[in-house]
Structures are given as C-alpha cells and as structure tokens.
Amino acid sequence: MAQTMNGLKRTDYCGALRMGDCGREVVVCGWVQKQRDLGTLCFADLRDRTGIVQIIADEGSAPEVREKLASLRAEYVVLAKGAVRERSSKNTAIPTGEIEVYPDEIRILSESQTPPFAIEENSQVNDQLRLKYRFLDLRRPDLQRNIMLRHKVAKLARDYFDENGFLEIETPMLQKSTPEGARDYLVPSRLHHGSFYALPQSPQLYKQLLMLSGYDRYMQIARCFRDEDLRADRQPEFTQIDLEMSFVDADDVMTVNEGFIKRLFRELLGVEVSTPLLRMPYSEAMDRFGSDKPDMRFGFELKNLTDIAKDCGFGVFEKAVEAGGSVRAINVKGYADKFTRKDIDSLGEFVKTYRAKGLAWMKVGENMQVQSPIAKFLSEDKLAAVLERTEAGPGDIIFFAADADQIVFDSLGALRCECASRLNILRPDDYKFLWVVDFPLFEYSEEENRYVAKHHPFTSPKDEDMDIVETDKARARAKAYDIVLNGTEVGGGSIRIHSQQLQERMFRALGFTMEEAWARFGFLLDAFRYGPPPHGGMAYGLDRLVMLMSGSESIRDVIAFPKVQNASELMSGAPDVVDEKQLRELGLAVTDREGPDGNKG
C-alpha cells in the first residue's frame, strides 16, 4: 500500500552521494530501477534525475525493512531513510558506485504496473510506442540528460546576452498572418468572426519594430510555429534563441555570437571552439560541397569536370553540358575497397531521391588502372584529365553526377555525406563550425513560377548589389549569414532593410503590388517613416543546437513532448475534434473531418 512522506523530507538526490557522505543519515526518493533478492541480501537501485544509488538490506536489517525492500518492483516510487556507508563490492561504472544507503525505513509512495518497455539507456523500443508513453520514455537517463542540457543552454544564453546588453522582451503569440514562406498555423477569433490570428513563424517583424522603438539589443527564447512537413531536424512547433541589434553591421552580429558559441561549448561540454570562425561565401560552399550547410569534418569535395566532359564522347555527360548543366564528381579517397557493386547500386538509388537520373563511378586500382562502366567512352587524354582533376590515386573511388547545376549540387552534396556516414568516419563530438555568407537575395521557385526571398523579404541586399534588386534577381546577394555545425544550419540571420523605399522595392521585386504590400506589411512600412535605425540579428534553432551538442540523431530526443511525422502527438491524441458549441462560438463549420490517423468522419 502506498504511504505518504509524513514529515520526512528528501535530503539528497540519489546521484549526488559520494564517499564523503559516509556516516550521514540521508533521505532519498526515486523510482526503482531494479531489485535483486539473494536471500540474506536484498538490493534495489533507486533512480532520480541525477542518477542511481543502491539501497541494501542484510541480516542485520529490521525484518520490516527487509520485507519492504524485497517487495519492491520496477518503477515503484520509494522513499528510503538511512545511513550512507562504503560498499564492500564497488561498481566503478556509476558515480555512486563506492557507496550505498543502508536504510532503517523504506516507504512505498506509489506502486507501478509493469511498464510497456524497460526504462533504460539507449532504448531500442520503436518510436511509436515510446511516444505513446512519452511520460515513461522521459524517465530514461539519456533523455533526462538531454532535457537538462537544453535547460542549461537556455540559461547560459540568457546570462550571456544579458551580460552583453541584451534585454529579454516577449513578443505576441497571436499575430497578423503575413504569408510569405512556410504555412501559418491559424487561430480563429471568437470576437471577430471570419478573422484569424496566426501563430508566429518567428518574431521577425516585432523584433525589428523593437529596434525602431529604441531598445537597441533584444533577445527572447521564442516559441515558433510552421505548418510544414516534418524531418529529423524539424517540428511544427520549435524554439529559437532570437536576437536583434541596432547600429551594427554583419561583423558585429557575428562577433557577439561567436562569443556565445565559444562560452556555450566551453562551459557545457568542455570543448574549446577556436574563433573567429571560418567564413565561406555561399558560392564557394556550393561549388566545393554542393550545399549551403557543408559538413567540414571530412573531404570528398566536389570537382567541376564540365570543361573536360564537354566533348568527352560519353553521351550522358555531353547532353548535360549542352543543356546548360554541369558534370561534377567527388573522390571518396582511399575507400574503393569499401564499396561493393551492391553498395554502388544502392548509392545510385540514393541520389535519385535528389532528382539525379543515376550515378556514374570509377575505381582506381594499382598502377592507376581504372575499373568503370564509362571508361570505354573516354579517350586516354580525357581519362587522364579526370583523374588529375579529381586528384585520384590507387584505392580511390570517384562518383559522377551530370545534370542541371542544382540537381548536381543536391545529389553530390548529399552523396558525400552519405558516403561518410556509411564509412562511419563521422564523430559527433568533432565540432566544426563555419559561417556561410553572401547568400543570394532571391531563389527561383518552380512551384510558384517566380523569384522568392531566399531568407525573408526583410533582408538587406549587399551595398554593391542595391541597383540590381529588381533588374537582375539571379545575381543579387544578401547581407545574410548562417552558422553551420557539422552539416546542420543551427542559426541564421541578416542585416535588415531599414528604408521604406528599399523595402517597397524589395516587395516589388517579389511580385507584390504596392496595395498588396501595404495590406500585409503596412504597419512595418508605416513605422519606417519614423526614424528606423540600421539593425540586424539572427536566431538559433535551440532544438537543433541541443540535438548536436547531445549527440542525438533527432530533435525529438531533446524535446519533452514532440510531434511525429504527421504533426500529431501520440500521447495526448492531438490534434482532435472539438464540439459543435465551440465551433458555433467561433462562427466556424467543419465540412470535412480527418483525424491524425487519416480516417475521415
């Protein structure tokens, strides 16, 4: 039967006890990890968020204590009062392995059914079951460490930016919908039927207005929402460390944030990050790595073979060049023997997910002998030129892609990372940071058949590109910068437009009429009439940052209650239907119902 604490108070956390506590009487509380009954001896491991401590009863223990300890089962909630003593058989695998608690009183505070899976490190239970019982999953020590690390990151961010003159200011969660980018989550208004709030995709406009209001340096741990498809590093609701600064240029923003990164990794991981961080123009990142978020932990860089392939005799390459595309390759240097024909075929299927039509390859053997299905199409001179350009040597394997530039970049950029992953050469504790700068101001959207903002419509063009914002969108560059860690963008920002005239030009370049621009963003354009300072900022994805710092494979492992692929929460059953009374109050009617399981009703 469950008991109350009846005046007894916890004195210590389980994982905090050490040899220096021997002889002390303590009260510890927690969940039973496991229990062992050896007849004359009975043990139980008691677990809380700090770790595990062993409690023990022996022949000298009171019978009621011995019986109570023997009755414990996994996940019972227990209070134990007793003396700390040195263990006769030490366990060096845990921090408390030199001591144990010898209780004179044990209370069962709560009993537990047998859980649907074991509460243990690195559980191999399938995600669906784990997330259905997330309240149990969150008891696992590895997840608890992640959640506590997340707390420490947020606290350090607040401390660091406060020390550097930033003010934490909250911005509204119920905002005006200004669709330009990802889909908004909409909230119907009860008082204004037919009108809707939008949950913020970011605090972007409000933080810019705070600069206009004279607050100079702003920060916020901000909740944001985007109605977009989920991936391993995305969720429909997420958290940003959000920043904005007045009277600054890009160097100022990057410098203060390098200080944050340096302190964050030193204090929480004991890792020294060398600053200033490498800065790489977007064009170089794409040319060398096929990605604007390159993983710098390994090589396998892209090599442009377009000039060699132009009249090489291999039709696939020649057609790609004639169509205005390119031929590029990566050399997975020294690993030819690691890729069987079956492996190569699977990589060919892999690049097809990036719209590539296929994958050509070439193995280099002893004496520079080449094994390749395409070698017969190439003259000796062309083959030698390929080997020289790719810096090939014995034991290398070269992969080729030929198509439109973007397809080549996407497929080879992903392929180099896939090869590194399959070769198991990536260490999660090898932290390689860089800034990617000088992004395009616009990118062409085939879906919308127009140029859209690469980042957002409030990003300032580079000074030397001001005159081509409307006339040469493909060449215009932005005062934008992303911070990249191990192939993941963990933050990004820009210097903002602070001129009403330039902001209007930007909207025109994006295809807005002035009537549309003022209808959507009139409050910002109007504010720009009243002395806006030059300003810029950035935001970190807190979830992604903690994911990388903790070595987790998914941001779901650093979020307490995450969503799954279809944006539902398995534990609570959200989203769910609401009753008709609520809909009537909002002036809404539902014409087609579909639950998270895909069933209509």
Image: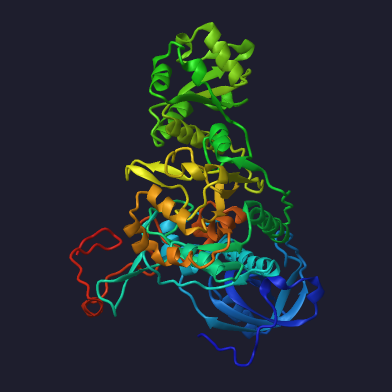
Residue 296 spot, x, y in % from top left = 62, 40
Number of numbered discs present? 0
Which residue lies at the image location 56% right of the left edge and 46% below the top edge?
463
Q: Nearer the viewer, residue 560 or 36?
A: 560
Residue that extends furthest to the top in the rendered view of this protein = 380
Image-based side of 371 in relation to 599, left or right: right
Relative side of 469 to 184, left or right: right
Residue shown at the point (57%, 49%) measured from the top left = 481
Q: Residue at position x 61%, y 62% from top?
A: 245
Q: Is residue 191 above or below residue 250?
A: below
Residue at horizontal 18 percent and vertical 65 percent from the top: 591
Closer-to-camera residue (45/272): 272
Q: Nearer the viewer, residue 420 or 194?
A: 194
Residue 599: x %, y % from top left: 23, 60
541 relative to 476, above or below: below
Q: Is residue 124 above or below residue 477?
A: below
Q: What percent of the width, then of the height, locates residue 172?
A: 46, 72
